[in-house]
Image: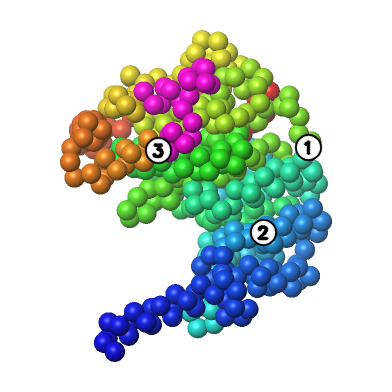
Amino acid sequence: MTETATARKRLFHKSDELKFCIECGKERCSFGWCKDCETSYMISNFKTWTSFNDHIDKLIQRTQLNATQTCDYLEFIDYSQFDMIKYVSRGGFSTVYKAKWLEGPRWNWDEDDQGWERSGPIDVALKRLDNSQNIHLDFLVQIEEHCKCLQNGYLADCFGITRDSTGCIMFVMRFYDNGNIYEFLDKVKGIITWRDIIDMLWGVASGLEKIHSEKRCHSNLHGGNLLIEDESISTDARISDVGLNGPCDKPRSISQLYGVLPFIAPEVLCGQQPNQSSDIYSFGIIMWTLASGLRPWHDRPHDLELARLICHENLRPEVDEVIKDIPNLYRELMERCWDSNPSNRPTASELNNLLGKWIICICDDPNTTPISEEFFNAEEKRWDLIGKQLNTNNFPKVVIHPEAVYTSVDTS
């Protein structure tokens, strides 16, 4: 037998090993994941942990029993597993800390034992829910809906739940070094390429398409819950807090509205419930935020007058004076997203397909197209302006109005 034939035979046997479980012989439903064996493993461990809340325990157990791959479930993680805990930031109804998870998730595949091993120490974010010692059943329903979106590559990774020494619930999530959109833009002084802008938006659109395809909506999409993963080949945005908003210790009320005012659709401000089209409005404001490098309406109070102007005067963030290099097709899509008539807005699926087409034209198509030419011209204008600012060190100073609020609040 030739060396090539031997290699092919070895590869065939290897793929066959990965396809079938060495313990029970049944076919695996995904890489390294035998549904029966992993479910048995999870059940055998149920008695070894508790969150001291039956509803949360059952919720975690349901994610484990329904898991079809290694990143598809939550686990309860004892608080003693976290070290080097440091405060990061404060949100509307939560506080975020950075910590080292000593064991890490079951993410490493052991070729010899044909099983999953823990990764070892990794950085995580601990999101502490205010007053969650008395978490309300209504918020547990929100968490349940959130968990149904775990298997989505464009959502921020959530590993599980823990309780701190005060009894508060904390989500254990991947720590993203670049923070959210605002922190990322501050870090790079608003200097990002049009390619990176489209890359980030494509990730958000893909995540929204997945959420909307499951008959859900995010309901509180804004720059603070889009987390940035800056890799060597691309800059990606991950969606967090799907369906989670408001205080966790109070019952839900359809008359109460929690969110960040600049990102809330006018029809929602006027009393309608958040829905998929209001997510698209928020997406349009995110398009403006990335293109401008600024927070929307950073120079004025986020008050009833701003809400009135958005709803009744069709006020939107300034484009002509702020984004001088904006491509026409980008502007047209952005303005469709924030159209006052929800039926005129594109769907998440349309956004995903369109932005994917733009990325291909910009990055992969060797031929010049009208789309690539428009973005290349915009890129040249952008870097001409940035070059002048770098030469003179004359970057515009942005002052945030003390009554401009970018964390979720009660806007009812």
Q: Main secondary structure of the magenta part?
A: helix
Name the spot of residue 147 as percent of width and height, x first: 64, 50
User: How far is mark 1 from mark 3, CA to CA?
Assistant: 39 Å
Q: Considering only vertical position in the picture, is 371 above or below 142?
A: above
Q: Are marks 3 and 2 in contact (CB under 8 Å)?
A: no
Query: Disc 3 or 2, which lies upstream in sequence?
Result: 2
Inter-mark Cα distance, 2 to 1: 29 Å
238 or 33: nearer the viewer: 33
Instruction: Work out which residue is located at the far front of the displayed protein and give it.
Output: 1
Q: Which mark is residue 353?
A: 3
- Please give the name of the residue rendered at 54% of the width and 31% of the height, measured from the top-left corner: 279
Circle 3 — which element? Answer: helix
**From the viewer's perspective, is 224 left or right of 192?**
right
Q: Position of residue 392 (x, y in %)?
A: 22, 34
What residue range appears in magenta?
A: 332-353
| Residue 250 tag number | 1
Q: Are marks 2 and 1 in contact (CB under 8 Å)?
A: no
> Is residue 285 in view?
no
Label 1 crowd bin: few (<14), some (14–19), many (20+), radius 10 Å:
some
Left or right: residue 384 versus residue 182 is left
Q: Which residue is mark 2?
A: 66
